[in-house]
Amino acid sequence: MPRIIIQLDRVGMIYQTGSGPVEALNDITLDVAEGEFVSLVGPSGCGKSTLLRVAAGLRPMTSGSIIVDGTPVTRPIPKVGMVFQAAVLLKWRSILDNVLLPAELAGLNAGAYCDRARDLLKLVGLAGFENKRPGELSGGMQQRVALCRALLLDPPLLLMDEPFGALDAMTRDDMNLELLRVWGEATGSAGRKTILFVTHSIPEAVFLSDRVVVMSPRPGRIADVVDINLPRPRSVETRATAEFGQHSLRIYDTLTGRKAGAAGVPLQALS
Amino acid sequence: MSNAARKLAEILPAFVLFALLLVLWQLAVSVFGIREYLLPSPTTVVNAMFSGHINWWGHIWATGLAIFGAFLIAAVAGIALGVVIAWSPMASRALMPFLVFVNTLPKVAVAPLFLLWLGYGILPNMLIGALIGFFPVVINTAVGLMQIDDDMLDLGRVFNAPKWKVFAKIRIPNAYPYILSALKVTATAAVVGAIVGEFVASQRGLGYVIITSQSSMNTPLAFGALVWISVLGLVLYGAVAALSRVLAPWAEGQER
Ligand SMILES: Nc1ncnc2c1ncn2[C@@H]1O[C@H](COP(=O)(O)OP(=O)(O)O)[C@@H](O)[C@H]1O
Ligand SMILES: [Mg+2]
């Protein structure tokens, strides 16, 4: 049994806003094992982003406790890689300097990370773009740069908030494969990063994950946890298997409250 | 179309209109026999601009120095205040009402006081220009520093990056387009301030030339000084625009 790296225990989060308190998370209890790929799916506004940020210590939670790697989270935990829906690259910096940003912010010698930054860019097919500016790259390329930036300090934990949500379907599928490759899917679970991945695409969650956590509308609670035991490494064919469809349907049913086996699933929900 | 040709096509309409107006002006003055002290013709103005009867270079130098100094003081003080306001909510609450009050003062009316306190010379004119010009810089700097994507700030938080580092590496570069567009406004304000100061009291400068030529009914001289003033203004504006292209090439066309 692998080590538990993230332990969320009855986590609750209430935002105080001008128009009164907004309960974003309610009683979230979840364990994530080291090297595990866990996706969070749920309707928009159900608290997925909040959960990621609370887990990283970027926002103080209102109740419950979070333990990451044996330490209770009370402030931003070091060495987390974050990727957001927008690439949020610094447009005044070159691609290489964008990837090096975490080293600078963490007070490390950026020069020492130059080679690693170049290797990462090469890994995601961006060799030769080091000196370009973000504005010269397509959305998919920018998101790859954001991924390299998140990986620069080799963090054991990756938190990804709808990282491919703004990409077209084809680019998104490419990026999914790329992410699994970078994660080290083919090399087995030893030394793999732990990934918490937010998406509102059911197929994306099923394709990538070991487990999919389905959340209910606000306040976000855990409605279902689906184990995805599809064999790895996964490929385009994975999407065509019967199991893939079954997992997707189960998640769809939980999300929509549809009775299992009833008719009328719009095709685009599952593709 | 080549790049140069496109540029040319862009400026051509304005250029043609300008030339046309000059020609019309020249014709109107000679056809209707307008008196020189009412409206001198363009050629008369150009003659006046280079006439050896007055020490143009001395006046241009004095006004240019006042404008440049005003701009520099406004830029430095404005950016510094903007950073302070964005840095500390407490400082912001303390400073903002005061700054808004200063900005509502008619600065032209304050000019005589400056002269009273500081005496004749270039310095009071500089300060009047700086006073008129610094407010937009403060506001734009503060806004540029604070209008930032929350995700971008999370990048800093993840690494427990110290506040000064987040300012130096993320917030300040993010504010460049805001600051640079404010500096363009300030370049114009600096000209106004310097001239106002010279109007109120001075023995040198292009503003002084206008005032004295008015009393001697030497209108071509006043027009000449006016053109020199706008040349100075254009040079400063052009320098700021060039600086912004060098400093923030990525911000071209997205200034606010
Ligand atoms: N900074 C905030 N202040 C107040 N309310 C917020 C804040 N961030 C999120 N919320 C609210 O919390 C709820 C969950 O938001 P979020 O975590 O962004 O959901 P999701 O990522 O699932 O779309 C939403 O109702 C949202 O309006
Ligand atoms: Mg979200």
Image: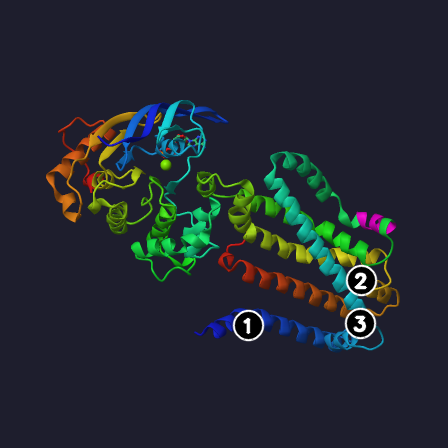
Instruction: Please state the chain letter of the residue tagged with numbered disc 1 in the rendered image.
Output: B
Of residues A98 and B36, which is closer to you in this image? A98
Residue position for label 3: B56
Q: Amino acid at mark 3?
A: Trp
Mark on residue B207?
Answer: 2
Query: How far is disc 2 from disc 1 in space, using C-alphas?
Result: 32 Å
- The kind of residue tagged 1 is Leu
- The CA distance from mark 2 to mark 3 is 12 Å
SS under mark 2? helix
Q: Chain of mark 3?
A: B
Residue A215 quadrant: top left
Mark 1, residue position: B12
Residue B145 horizontal/vertical position (percent) = 56, 45
Estimate the x, y position of residue B217 in percent, counting from the top left: 86, 68
Is B114 colored magenta in this rendering? yes
Q: Nearer the viewer, residue A62 or A31?
A: A31
Same subunit: marks 2 and 3: yes
Say if residue A76 shows up in the picture: yes
Determine if residue B136 is in view: no
Local secondary structure at mark 1: helix
Q: CA distance from mark 1 to mark 3?
A: 31 Å
Q: Position of residue B176 (x, y in %)?
A: 56, 52
Tell me the quarter of the picture where residue A162 sits. top left
- Specify the quadrant that holds the N terminus of chain B: bottom left
Q: Nearer the viewer, mark 2 or mark 1?
A: 2
